[in-house]
Amino acid sequence: LQDAISLLHDELLSPFATGEWGAPYLHAYSIAAAVSLLEDRTVALRLVSVVPGALAVPVLYLGLRELFDRRFALVAAVLQAVAAWSILQSRHGYVWAVSTLAVAASVRWLARGLRLGRWTDFALAGFALGI
């Protein structure tokens, strides 16, 4: 949160470097944007992790549906939705909630790329891994 506060006070930081606790500054930029829009720091901090954590569930379902059948994908998505570690990451505003979404998105795009053979799907998988 301290890095996000520094950003709000016009201190520019490289989004590719890491700050507090090894968290990338890109996460701090997201928090700073949310704080500037919502003005409640607690809600902003949690919202930046809750949204990616919630989006990871359907994205995981889509990725696993590409690789397996619907039933397997649904069971995995439900387990992801109720997993204590996933809820904890999203609820407390940890940066790792974004990683869960990035991995789920990379699985989805990689599986789609393998099935369809389109280079854009592979590029999107690489972009998701880069986040």
Image (cartoon, rainbow, N blue to C red):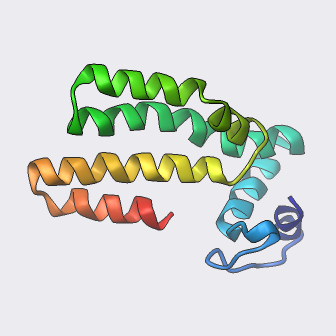
Q: Quadrant of residue 59?
A: top left
Residue appearing at x 26%, y 54% in the figure: 110
* Rendered location of residue 112, percent (x, y): 20, 47
Residue 60 located left or right of residue 54: left
Q: Is residue 74 above or below residue 57?
A: above
Q: Quadrant of residue 15?
A: bottom right
Residue appearing at x 74%, y 62% in the figure: 28
Q: Is residue 48 above or below residue 55?
A: below
Residue 66 located left or right of residue 76: left
Specify whether residue 86 is in view: yes
Foreground residue among 72 and 7: 72
Residue appearing at x 23%, y 56% in the figure: 121
Residue appearing at x 35%, y 65% in the figure: 126
Specify whether residue 40 is in view: no
Residue 86 located left or right of residue 18: left
- Quarter of the image where the N terminus is located: bottom right
Foreground residue among 129 and 35: 129
* Rendered location of residue 98, percent (x, y): 59, 51
Q: Is residue 13 above or below residue 125?
A: below
The count of marks equals 0
* Rendered location of residue 79, percent (x, y): 50, 25
Q: Quadrant of residue 71?
A: top left
Residue 81 located left or right of residue 45: left
